[in-house]
Amino acid sequence: MKLLRSFFWAAIAFAAAVCLGGIAIFRGERINSAWLVVAAGCAYATGYRFYGKFIATRVLALDDQRATPAERLRNGQDFEPTNKWILFGHHFAAIAGPGPLVGPVLAAQFGYLPGTLWIVIGAVLGGAVQDLIILFASMRRDGKSLGQMAREEIGKAGGFAATVTVLLITIIMLAVMALVVVNALRGSPWGTFTIAATMPIAVFMGLYLRYWRPAKVLECSAIGFALLVAAILGGRAVAQSASLAPWFTLSALALAGAVIVYGFLASALPVWLLLAPRDYLSTFVKLGVVLMLAAGIALVRPQLQLPAFTRFVDGTGPIFAGKIFPFCFITIACGAVSGFHSLIASGTTPKMIAKEGHALPLGYGAMLAESFVAMMALIAACTLQPGVYFAVNSPAGLVGATPQAAAAAISSWGFPVSAAGMADLARDVGEKTLFARTGGAPSLALGMAHIFAGGTPFGAGGRLAIGFWYHFAIMFEALFILTIIDAGTRVGRFMLQDLLGHAWKPLGRTSWMPGVTAASAAMVMAWGYFLIQGVRDPLGGINSLWPLFGIANQLLAAIALCLATTILVKMHGLKFVWITCAPLGWLVTVTFTAAWQKIFSPAPAIGFLAQAAHLEASLRAGAAGSPAAAVEALIFNARLDAAVCGILLLLVAVILVDSLRLWIGILRGVREPRLRESPFVVSRLHMEEL
Amino acid sequence: MNRLRRMGKLAWALLRELADESAYQRRLRAQGRRDSPEEWRRFTEERYQARFTRSKCC
C-alpha cells in the first residue's frame, strides 16, 4: 500500500514537472489550456502533500490534542468549532477577491508563461506558506489580528508601522478597485443599469431580512439573485432604448462621482440596509461563478491564443510599463502571494478551527485554491485573440482615440486587429465599443463569456448568450468590487478613528456622529482622490495605480512574513528560518526594486518623478496639448504617487529593521524568545470527526 | 450515493454558514432563546458590528 502511494505521488510530481516543463520549453504552436490546468493542479497537490505537510507537522507541530480557541472560548458565535470543509468554503470566500482575477489578466501582456510560472511557484512556496503560518499564529493566540500580533511579537514601533501601512494600503486598494469598476462601466448603459440595479436589490433584501422574513438569508439571497438575473436581462432592453440608454450612459468622471457617493453612504448608513445584504449576495455569486468558470474551462478546454512571451517583456507594454522583473510579480500580486490574506487569516477563521491539524487545508489549501482562480483568469484572458486583448486593454492616450488609429497601432505591434472586427465583437456583447476598456475587467469578462457561451450548456442562444454572459461577468466583478469598496471604506473609517482617537478622544468614538461623518468623509476623499486621478490620467490610470496597489499588497505580505519569521526564530532559532526568509527575501527584492523604479526610473512611462519632469518640460515648452491646469494636476499626482510609494517603503523598512534587530537579539541570546501563545489545554474534540 | 448525499449536506451546511443562519441557530441554542424578529436584529447587530470592522480581501 505504501509503495502504491509512493508511486501515485511520484506520478503526480512527474506530471507537474512534465506539464510545467512542456509549456516552458516548447514554442511555436498553440497550446491547450488543459496543460496549464494539469500543471497547476499537480504542482499544487505535490506542494500541499509534501511542503505544506512538512511545515504543518515538523515546523509548526500542529497538535490535535491541543484545544483551539474555538473549543476553549466556545460561545456559540465567533468561537465555534466548525467542520473543516465548511470552514474551508468560508475562508476561501473571504480571501477570494478581485485581485487574483484582474492581476493575471493584466500580466498576460507579457504572454502566458511568466504569469503561469509565478502563479504556481509563488503560491506553493510563498503565498500558501504565509497564510498557513499566520493562521497558525493567530490560532495559537486566541484569534488575534496581524497588528496585535506584530505589536506583541515584534515590538511597538513595528506594530504602529503595520497599522499605518494597512490604512495606506486600504486607501490605494479601494481607489484601484473603484477604477476597475469605472473603466468597465464607462459608456456602457447595459452594465451601468445592471450595477445600479444591485443597490435597490440590496436595500430590498435588507428590508426583507429586517422586517418581513428575519433570519431567512438563503431564501432572501435566492430572490436577490433572481432579481440580479432579471436586471442583467433588463439591462439589454435599457441599452437598446433610445430614451433610457442616455440615462445610463455615463462618463468615467460621472461614474467615479457615483462610486464615491456610494462609498460614503455605505460607510455611514446602517449596515443591515445595504452592506450586509450585498455581502451575502456577492459571496454566493462569487463562489458560484468560480465553480462555473472551473467547469467551463474543464468542458471547453480552450486553446490559448496569446504566445508564451510577447514583445513587451522588454518593458514597453501598453497596459503597464516595466520589465517582467519586477513588474510581472507585483502585478499578479494576490494570485501568488497576497498580503491581505494575512488580515483574513488573523480574523474569523482562527476562531472557528476545530482542530489544529485543520490549519493545513485552511491556510495552505485555500491559498492554493485562490491561486487556481488566478490561473483560470489568466486562461480566460489568454484565450482572446492577442489583437483583441491589446485593443481592450490599451489606453486611448497611447494607441489613439479612434478605432482605426487604435487598430493600426496594435496591428503594428504584430497583433492584427481591425476596427470592423472590434465593432462586431462590441455589438455581440451589447457594447458601443470595446477599445480602451482598461482595467482588466472587460477583457476577463470577454474571455469568460467566450468560455461560457462557446461550448457549455450555458451557451445556447448565440449572440444573446455572449451578451448575457459578458454582462453577467461584469456584474459579478463589479458586485464584489463594490462590496470591497463599501466594507473597506467602513473599515478604513474605523482605522482612521482609532488613530485620530489618540490625538482627540471623541474622534475615536465610533458612536459619535460628527466623528463618524468626518472620518467617513476623510476616508472617501482619500481614495476618491486617487480614483479621480486615475480617471483623469490620459494613460487610463491603471499604468500608475495598479503597480502602486501591487507594491502595497506585496509589502503587506512582507510585513506578514516578518511576523512569521519572528515566530519561527522564537520557536526553532535558525533551523527553519529559510521557509519564510526565502519568500520574504524575494518579496523585499521585488517590491523595493519596483518601488525604486516607480519613483526614480528615468523613463517617464515608468518613473513618477521622470513623468512629472517630462510633463513640466512639455508645459514650459508649450507642447503639453492639454490645459495648463490639467497638466499641473498630472504633475502633482505623479509626485504624490512617488511620495506614497516612498512612505510605504519607509514604513516597511521600519518593520524590517525592527524585526531584524529582534531576530539578531534572540539568536545572540540577548533577547528572550518568548512566544505569546495561549496556554496548552487538552482538547476534548480531538477524537471527534469534524 | 451516500458520498453524494454527504457532499450535498456539506454544501448546504456551507451555504447556511455563509448566510449566518447556522450562527444564529447556535446563538439561540447557547443562550436558550427562541427565534423572533427582535432576536434576529440583536444577533445581526453584533454580528455585523464585528464583521464590518475588519478589512476585506482584495
Image (cartoon, grey):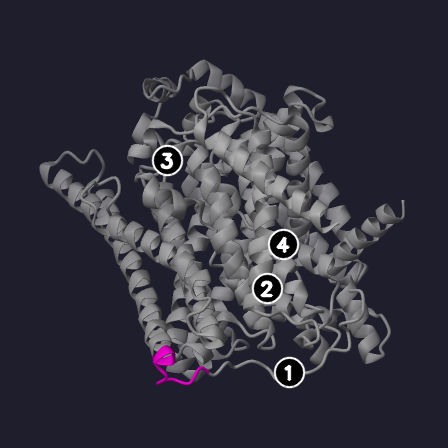
Depth check, mark 3 against mark 2: the one in front is 2
Given residues A655 and A543, the one toward you in this image is: A655
Residue identifier under label 1: A680
Q: Residue A56 shows which numbered tag?
A: 2
| Vertical placement of residue A583 versus A634, above or below | below
Is residue A244 something one can see in this rendering? no
Sequence order check, earlier mark of 4 and 2: 2
Q: Sort mark 4 into few (<14), some (14-19) or many (20+) by Cα contacts within 10 Å.
A: many
Sequence order check, earlier mark of 1 and 4: 4
| Vertical placement of residue A308 versus A42, above or below | above
User: Which element type, helix, strand or loop, lies under badge 2?
Assistant: helix
> Label 1 sits on what residue type?
Phe
Disc 3 to disc 2, C-alpha distance: 40 Å
Q: Chain of mark 3?
A: A
> Label 4 sits on what residue type?
Phe
Sequence order check, earlier mark of 3 and 2: 2
Q: Residue A319 shows which numbered tag?
A: 3
Q: Chain of mark 4?
A: A
Residue A142 in magenta stretch: no
Can you tell which quarter of the image residue A314 is in?
A: top left
Where does residue A73 sit, x and y in percent of width and height? 69, 80
